[in-house]
Amino acid sequence: MPSLLSPGRIHCLEVDNFKSYKGFQMIGPFYDFTAVIGPNGAGKSNLMDAISFVLGVRTGQLRGAQLKDLIYALDDREKDQKGRRAFVRLVYHLANSTEIRFTRTITSAGSSEYRIDDTLVNWDAYNNRLKSLGILIKARNFLVFQGDVESIASKNPKELTALVEQISGSDECKRDYEQFEEEKGTAEEKSALAYQKKKTVVMERKQKKEQKEEAEKHLRLLQELKSMKREHFLWQLFNIHNDYVKTIKDLEDEERSREGVVKELENFENEASKKKKEQAKYLKEIALREKRINEKNSKLDKSQPELLKLKEEMTRITSKIKKGKKELDKKKVERTKHDADIALLQNGIQDLTAKMVELQEKGRDVGDELDLQGNDLDEYFRIKEEAGMKTAKLREEKELLDRKLNADSEAQNNLEENLQQLRNRESELNSQEEQMRARLEKILDNSAKNRTGLENLKKELRVMQDKHRDSKKKYENLRLKIGEVENQLRELRADRYESERDVRLSQAVETLKRLFQGVHGRMTDLCRPTMKKYNLAVTVAMGKFMDAVVVDKESTGKECIKYLKDQRLPPQTFIPLESIRVKPIMERLRTLGGTAKLVFDCKFDPSLEKAILFAVGNTLVCDDLEEAKILSWSGERFKVVTVDGILLTKSGTMTGGTSGGMEARSKQWDDKKIEGLNKKKEQYETELESLGSIRDMHLKESEASGKISGLEKKIQYAEIEKRSIEDKLSNLSHEKKTIKERIECISPELKKLNDAVNKSNAEIRKLERRINEITDRIYRDFSKSVGVANIREYEENRLKAAQNIAEERLNLSSQLSKLKY
């Protein structure tokens, strides 16, 4: 709310058709002190209503049901007229001589319009402008109506505080204050947690320091232990040496005694030798007898399987005969097949001969295009055919060697390629193995750190869980106790009704106890019946003194009475302990027998005995009415009350137990118990708050459990990755071993192939030389006749066109030679 800029006051009031003011009326000017007087009905209250209206007060507080009820009307007919309007304008002078005009108008539609200095504004702007001048509509701090002073004076401290907060505007900040208070509590909890963490770190630091000192002490003790061990071992060596010398002496004595024993042993051995010879003789004879028996048994056993052996031999021979017949049939089939193959080969020879003739004809046609004469060409082909026939076997060997060379070369290339791929793969596997081993080492290091952290976290969690378990048990115990107290309070208050007067009396007594030192409290607060069933009886016995206030002296009571009058509070009865006069208790009444007891024998502070005696005197209480009548009206008379609340006086009158609201008043005895239960509940709630929030406990446990779960998952994933890497390393190792074995296997094969290729090349070159030599020898005369060094020069330079035909003839000759030979 904006601060008040400067004080001001109402200068005048302009009204138009508002309530009892017909037409336009100007009221004022007003001064610092202005009194409005007049008879009843003159409009004094309407003036207050006009000021309240223009300052925004609701219609319900201006003695009207709706806004139209505030417009001036002489009679009902005028009320029903349409288009009626009214307004109230307040001219407000500020201290700096400026003025503000606030106008509130009732329109013909029955709504309100607000204007500030003739400018139409909404309600929020209008209200904010009034607030800036310190005028609060909600608090109604600008007018004091009839009864307001008395109402404020009768408010209790809590209500006064609420009023002050409303007037000051601080209640608007209540929500922010509560939010900030909650944030403050959260911040304090976080601060406490941070402090606890700091405390834990300091404790850990101290623990580490102690561990360091303990480690240094351990090292020092280790040095001392080494020194002591050295001395101990020297001492042992000394004793061992002495034992050794003594043992040597004992050994020499034993050697001397052993010689005598050896001589006796030799005599015994000689006798034993003689006995053994005799034993051997008998054993030999036994062995011969057993051998003969075995030979006889053996012959008998051997004669039996001879028959079986012969039978098996016959079966084997029969099987061989059957097998021989099958082989004979098979050979006959093969012979038939060979005959067919021979016929087929003969047909092939005829076909090849026909093809040779055809090629010769074709060769002649080609020869016509050459430089040779017809006879020379025939001679060439004849010699060519002769050379082909003579070199056919060599050419066939060369062809076989060429195929073998091609196969070996291809195998050689494949092996070399495989070997290179294996070596590349081996290098790649070595690189992968190195990376995997580095990764595995890193995983093992991290896993060890995580396991250490996991153990520490688990220990912390166990400690935290134990602490939280105890706190939770205590928390549940306190909640159970609070629930029990609340149930007791609920039962006590279930049938108890406090009127507004009782509440005000209780608050007044509390105020008196706080203001005046000698006030002890109300009678219901200072004593208590021994059993609950006597509540109604004690209430009836005390009568008007039930709510009496006990004070130390008469002057204190007078001051209290004066205070009650000043505060316009209900009157109270006061019992001053110093000045009251009481009759002593008749002790014989305690021994009357039956159910009769003195009302005086209730629970109270001994210092208040006079007040209790003053209130109840020697009144007796008993369980049933008949017993009460006997005590009250037979012989010596007494004042008696029953547990049902029936009062019997000495004069013989009797009043009903529940009349006059006595039963309801008897419930006041529970007030003290309620107060005690409330204090106990507050104590339990304080202890509950000191335990801290269960949610924070769960959060801490969840945080620790989350960290543990995270570490366990890390360890689990690390273990999985470790196993995966170990499996991969195992596979790599196995693959490397396989590759190495393959390389070791391929290398000899490759060397063998290289040797075979080189050998084949040498043999092919040798065969080519032999073929060329034979061909040159056969073509020597022909080569001279055609003028070339050898026939190959002629074939390459002059018979290029007939080369294919010659080769084909050569192939046919080779095939024909194969079929013939």
Image (tube, rainbow, N blue to C red):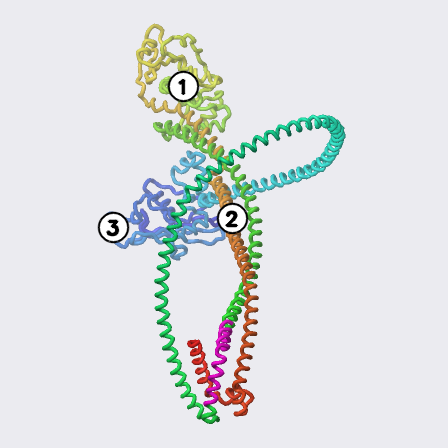
Disc number for residue 719:
2
Q: Which x, y percent locates residue 468?
A: 49, 36
Q: Which x, y percent locates residue 101?
A: 41, 53
| Mark 1 or mark 2: whose residue is earlier in sequence | 1
Q: Which residue is mark 3?
A: 78
Q: Which residue is mark 1?
A: 529
Q: Is residue 643 above or below residue 718?
A: above
Quarter of the rendering occupied by the C terminus: bottom left
Q: Nearer the viewer, mark 1 or mark 3?
A: 1
Q: Is residue 717 above or below residue 233?
A: below
- Quadrant in the rendering for residue 504: top left
Q: CA distance from mark 1 to mark 2?
A: 76 Å
- Quadrant in the rendering for residue 772: bottom right
Is residue 385 highlighted in magenta? yes
Q: The residue tagged with tag 2: helix, strand or loop? A: helix
Residue at 55% x, 32% y is 285
Res. 394 in view: yes
Magenta region: 378-404
Apparent side of residue 630 relative to residue 99 in the rendered image (left or right): left
Mark 3, other Cα within 10 Å: few <14 / some 14–19 / many ≥20: few
